[in-house]
Amino acid sequence: MISYEGAKAIVVDAGQARGCKTETIMTQKVMGRVCAADVLAPLDIQPFDNSAMDGFAVRLDDLNEDGGILTKSGMVAAGGSAPKKAIQPGQCIEIMTGAPTPPGVEAVVPIELVEVQGDEISFKAQPEMGANIRRAGEDFKRGMEVLGAGQVIHPQHIMPLAALGIDKVSVFKKPRAVFLATGNELVDNLSQDLKPGQIYNSNRPYGLAALEEMGIECVDAPSVPDDPDQFEALLKGLVSQNIDFIISSGAVSAGKFDFVREGLEKAGAEILFHKVKIKPGKPNLFARLQNGTLYFGLPGNPVATTAGLRFFVQPCLQAMVGMKEEEPVRAKAMSSFKKRAGLRMFLKARADFQQDGSLGVDLLDGQASFMVSPFLNMNCWAVVPEDVEEIKAGDIVDVYPLYPHAGLL
């Protein structure tokens, strides 16, 4: 067995070597995608000085602390060209929100703070310099970084992109993957009654949903019975489909029906590691097929499968698109847990803010790798290092959200 850190390093190196191609897509379609190149502001925002209010544009010297009376000399509406003629002494200009400010204007007084009698405008006080004026380049300067390569694009990024007139973004193409669940006992049809010895296949629908959440395009494939010949035939067919990942659950341990490693070796795959010092998921297998497709052989217990997707497939994906290594969140344990030294453990957990504002994490009951009922309450994984045998309430532990960009709460 190798350590988790050693296994993750192998996975990350393989992901970087595999890489992802890029494509350019419309801005309104980029949610959840990863930037393939830095996005720079092509212009200043605001593009020109303009009014933040409906009101009157003034020079400060024309008013004193008590205000004064000025003559309206014109009006500027939003959407029009910036006036070329400077505002004259003793005059003011009516201006609408978003309209460009004429040369010489030093402030805009909201219409609610003046009295209008024809073209005579009475002001009650002198405004501050720059009041209610949006300055050119105040929000974005031409050339500044808007998004960085390797950054995931979320809905909140669309507003700045659109404001800057950026209609297309270069992003990494979605990796393509297939998820294979193995086992004679599995029933894919969730509406079908179970026969003795059967269980519903929970790994496959979860695996497909998790991969989609990660930004991976899934290729449909059937579940695999405990038949090495069928597995080898299916593997041969998948190799020709230009798939980035093949992910299977089950058949990677040392039992009579654990055929994945032998099938991979027959196909000429390079076994990069098999068995890791973790729980759940010690029999994890990682290989590279002759065509470069990466193979993740995850143990079949449901929690081992979910942990493998989160802590092996996800880091590989992030490496493929140039993302920075994920850092854990630190939280205070609200409950205790004991384990034996030598294995890193991924614990089902729930993080919540406490009354004092600190982040606490509860290590949930039901940590056995077959138990999925805690999934209804968990929102994160708590990670206990190999050399730690006990977590006590109040200890600080590393916490990872269920998905890297979902957040903890």
Image (spheres, rainbow, N blue to C red):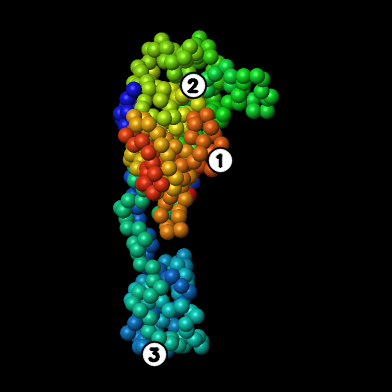
Secondary element type, mark 3: loop
| 375 relative to 287 in the view: left or right | right
Q: Which residue is mark 1?
A: 376
Q: Is residue 267 visible?
A: no
Measured from the top left, where is residue 171 in percent x and y? 40, 39
The residue mark sitting in front, 2 or 3, is 2
The residue identified by callout 2 is 250
Asked if the residue at tag 2 contacts the one at tag 1, i.e. Cβ–Cβ closer than 8 Å, the answer is no
Image mark for residue 125:
none
Residue 104, compared with residue 219, is above or below; it is below
Give the secondary structure at mark 1: helix
Residue 61, compared with residue 184, is above or below; it is below
Q: Nearer the viewer, residue 342 or 326?
A: 342
Give the position of the N terminus as an image quadrant.
top left
* Residue 118 left/right relative to 193: left
In-front residue for pair 340/399: 340
Which residue is disc 3 drawn over? 66
Q: Earlier in the sequence, mark 1 or mark 2?
A: 2
The answer to which image quadrant residue 82 occupies is bottom left
Q: Amino acid at mark 1?
A: Leu
What is the number of callouts on the image? 3
Secondary element type, mark 2: loop
Pointer 2 or 3: first along the chain: 3
- Residue depicted at 43% across the width and 50% down the height: 360
Tell me what residue is drawn at x 33 percent, y 77 percent.
129
**Viewer-side residue, 103 vs 202:** 202
Badge 3: residue crowd in 10 Å (few <14, some 14–19, many ≥20): few
